[in-house]
Image (spheres, rainbow, N blue to C red):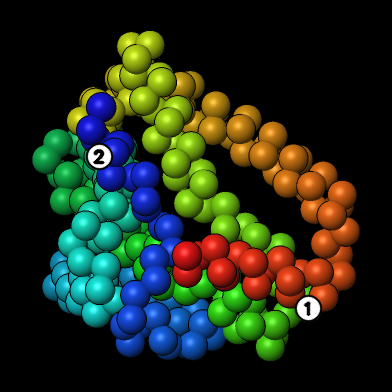
């Protein structure tokens, strides 16, 4: 059951006195966009290795260390055997293994900067950066969505543990076998989708009940969120 234990704190904001944390939210968001674009454009192993090394350096510069990197990295590693398996089915073995691993690393490098962004940026800072370009209502929606990312990561962990107790083959080591992918979709993705829809409905009703449409109320809410994150 320990395979998913590291996911418990994945993508969760952690306050540290680091240069990455002190960097403005707008600059960090721009850096994430640039890094994701580089991940998409990169094809060679050398360029992907350089990007990965830079990401590792940024995690340590943010004082998150190897534990923080591993907690975020493990979730994205799940997709690598799936991508490799699909390429192997399409191109055969061993012809599909190297291109599949390359594509899996690209996907990992596309999403991991966003994880670092969530780790080092409080909601109030994200909101302040986005309000320069977007209307307040849209900013509120985006920031609230960001806040739910760690929640759904924990949901994945809990659902996976419960399904494994029922005998489902959804452990990371099981995903190397394409025969177990049906369990991944039936026992993990579908329950997660149902829970996400239910959570979104509850969050929407809660927001309406609290009258969070006004800018002043949104600001007060994010002040409380920021205080909770630092606490």
Query: Residue at point 55% right, 26% down?
Result: 191
Q: Nearer the viewer, residue 40 or 33?
A: 33
Q: Is residue 207 visible?
A: yes
Reading the image, the residue beneath label 1 is 135
Callout 1 crowding tier (Cα within 10 Å): few <14, some 14–19, many ≥20: few
Reading the image, the residue beneath label 2 is 81
Q: Position of residue 31 (x, y in %)?
A: 42, 82
Q: Quadrant of the N terminus?
A: top left
Residue 138, by quadrant, is bottom right
Mark 1 vs 2, N-terminal side = 2
Q: Secondary structure at mark 2?
A: helix
Q: Is residue 44 visible?
A: no
Task: Estimate the spatial distance between the alpha carbons at disc 1 and disc 2, rounded to whole Å.
Answer: 40 Å
Of marks 1 and 2, the one in the foreground: 1
Q: Residue furthest top?
A: 166
Q: Nearer the viewer, residue 164 or 174?
A: 164
Callout 2 crowding tier (Cα within 10 Å): few <14, some 14–19, many ≥20: many
Q: Residue furthest front?
A: 231
Q: Secondary structure at mark 1?
A: loop
Query: Residue at point 45% right, 28% down?
Result: 159
Q: Position of residue 225 (x, y in %)?
A: 60, 65
Q: Is residue 51 above or below residue 7?
A: below
On screen, residue 92 versus residue 195, left or right, reads left
Q: Is residue 61 above or below residue 145?
A: below
């Amino acid at each position: 059951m320990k395979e998913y234990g590291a996911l418990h704190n994945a993508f969760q904001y952690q306050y540290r006195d680091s240069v990455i944390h002190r960097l403005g939210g707008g600059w960090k968001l721009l850096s994430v966009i640039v890094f994701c674009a580089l991940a998409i454009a990169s094809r060679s192993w050398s360029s992907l290795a350089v990007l990965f090394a830079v990401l590792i350096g940024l995690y340590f510069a943010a004082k998150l260390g190897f534990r923080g990197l591993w907690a975020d990295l493990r979730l994205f590693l799940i997709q690598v055997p799936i991508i490799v398996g699909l390429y192997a089915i399409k191109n055969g073995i061993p012809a599909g293994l190297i291109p599949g691993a390359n594509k899996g690393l690209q996907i990992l490098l596309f999403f991991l900067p966003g994880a670092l962004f969530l780790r080092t940026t409080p909601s109030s800072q994200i909101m302040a950066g986005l309000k320069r370009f977007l209307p307040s209502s849209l900013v509120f929606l985006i920031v609230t969505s960001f806040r739910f990312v760690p929640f759904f990561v924990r949901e994945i962990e809990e659902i996976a543990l419960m399904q494994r107790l029922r005998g489902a083959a959804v452990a990371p080591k099981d995903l190397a076998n394409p025969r177990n992918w049906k369990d991944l979709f039936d026992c993990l993705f579908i329950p997660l989708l149902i829970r996400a829809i239910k959570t979104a409905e509850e969050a929407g009703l809660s927001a309406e009940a609290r009258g969070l449409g006004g800018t002043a109320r949104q600001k007060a809410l994010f002040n409380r969120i920021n205080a909770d994150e630092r606490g």
